[in-house]
Amino acid sequence: MSSHQLLLFFILFVFLVPESHKTGMLPSVHWTIERVIAVGMIPLYPIALYIENPTTNFLVVTAVSMHAYWGLDGVIKDYAFERRYGPLLMPILRTIWKLICATGFAGLLYFNYNDIGFIAAVKKLWSV
């Protein structure tokens, strides 16, 4: 897959993910995926520091982007509730957050493919 296809996939994933339904299956699957990615990030970082290649760069950037997206999206869902702030605040905040995350992910992918990569940048930052 090219970087453009991956970026398109991520943008479609972020903007077209179905909202939680009251059926009980989708939220539990979503919760499981969030936890698998969060736990998978623990060994991913040390592995990425030792095995630095485009694949580990992509995995780290994707995991960090998805983790950040789901984390703050949960905060928005928990604290921008309709009965206190009205029906428009939550959709506006979530749309802004989706745009910020998609732009950030695209920027990190661009940095990975056209510069030294995310892992090398972290190593350089730590060596200062």
Image (tube, grey):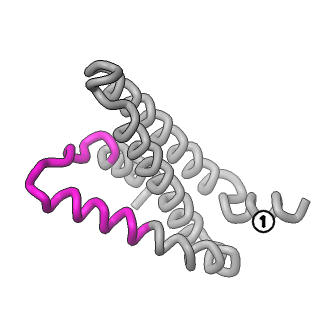
Q: Is residue 8 left or right of residue 121?
A: left
Q: Nearer the viewer, residue 27 or 62?
A: 27
Residue 38: horizontal and vertical position, in percent?
A: 47, 67
For the point 55% across and 64% down, the residue is 60
Residue 48 screen position, x and y as percent: 63, 74
List x then y, in percent, for residue 110: 58, 48
- Magenta residues span 14-37
Give the farthest residue toward the right.
128
The relative height of residue 94 versus residue 116 in the rendered view (above or below) is above
Q: Camera-side residue: 79 or 122?
A: 79
Asked whether residue 10 is drawn in magenta, I would say no
Q: Quadrant of residue 87?
A: top left
Residue beneath the point at 47% across and 56% down:
67
- Residue most toward the front? 84
Quick one: 91 or 81, which is closer to the camera? 81
Describe residue 67's horizontal placement relative to residue 95 as left or right. Answer: right
Q: For the residue marked with disc 1, what is the amino acid? A: Lys
Q: Where is mark 1, residue-wise?
A: 123
